[in-house]
Every structure is written in C-alpha cells, then in structure tokens.
Amino acid sequence: MSTITTLRINGTDRSVATDGGRSLLEVLREEFDLTGSKYGCGEGECGACTVLVDGAPKRSCLTSLSTVAGKEITTSQGLATGGKIHPVQEAFLAENAFQCGYCTPGLILSLAGLLKKKPIPSDAELILRLEGHLCRCCAYPNIIKAIGRAAAQARH
C-alpha cells in the first residue's frame, strides 16, 4: 500500500509516495538518486549504508521508511556546508583513506556523527566508532590516519 511520506533529507523536505515498509536505503537510492549510501550486506553488518538520523549513525538497509518520517536524515551528499566539504571528508582525502570507496561514505558519516555529538572524542571512542564498518580493500591504516587527522582538527 502506497502512502505519501515526507522526509527531511540533507536539510530539504522531500515527499515520496511508496510503501512505508521499504528500506530507507532503497528509497534514498531509487527515489531520490542519493547513491552515496551503498548496499553492502543488507543485514546492517558492513556499515556501507550508514546515514545519520537526527545526528546518530543508522544502518539505512535495516531502517524502514515509516520510522524516519519527520526526522533529519543526512547522507554523504549533505555533509558539505557553504560549498566546503566536511572536515572528516577532508581528512579522508588528505590521507587517501579509501581505495574502491564503497565503505567510505558510511565511515565518514559515522565519524561525522561522533564529532558532532562529541567534538573532542578520545582515541578509544574514535576506534570504537569503526566497529561494524568493513573495508573490503583493507585500507584500515589510512582510515586510522584519517580518523586521527579529523580528531586533531576537531581538537584545534
């Protein structure tokens, strides 16, 4: 059964007529052409589909559309402000913290969510935020460097 759902995505209200049980990931990609969030495992285990919902990381492959109506959804396309990319995005670029890039948007959003909640996190909190994010290219050494760079920038 199709219903009209209004979502606030990257600061803009957008409506879609669809089944409220569809996954947020599917709607973002197929209805709004926001393809930064990736379909990885479909089980919430790999982190490729991570978006921010009201500032908190959420696995969009497991999130039904009806549960996020009226909440602020941020995708990787919505992190930039004033024409400038987010500091975590800058850190990932500076440290070449990606190879294929499939996991990158989810990692960046998860870390951006942490830095918004806690601007000066501990190293342990930063590493813990990586839990549940799989990088099939094994770019972890550069990802760790990017996390350190982003954290250092947040501390200054």
Image (spheres, rainbow, N blue to C red):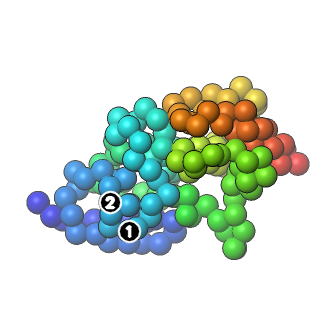
Name the outermost residue toward the right: 156
Q: Which residue is at a point 57% across and 48% down the rendered structure image?
A: 100
The secondary structure type at the circle numbered 2 is helix
Looking at the image, residue 71 sits to the left or right of residue 69; the answer is right
User: What residue would you read off at disc 1?
Assistant: 32
Q: Which residue is at a point 83% across and 48% down the rendered structure image?
A: 153
Q: Which residue is at a point 22% across and 69% down the rendered structure image?
A: 17
Counting every numbered tag in the picture gives: 2
**As shown in the figure, which amino acid type bears the numbered disc 2?**
Val
Q: Which residue is at a point 39% across and 47% down the rendered structure image?
A: 39
Q: Position of residue 73 (x, y in %)?
A: 47, 58
Q: Is residue 127 above or below residue 89?
A: above
User: What residue would you read off at disc 2?
Assistant: 27
Q: Position of residue 60 (x, y in %)?
A: 40, 47
Q: Is residue 4 above or below residue 22?
A: below
The secondary structure type at the circle numbered 1 is loop
Marks 2 and 1 close (CB-CB < 8 Å): yes
Can residue 146 be spotted in the picture? yes
Front-most of 130 and 95?
95
Q: Position of residue 146 (x, y in %)?
A: 75, 43
Name the outermost residue toward the left: 1
Could you give the CA–CA distance between mark 2 and mark 1, rounded to whole angstroms? 7 Å
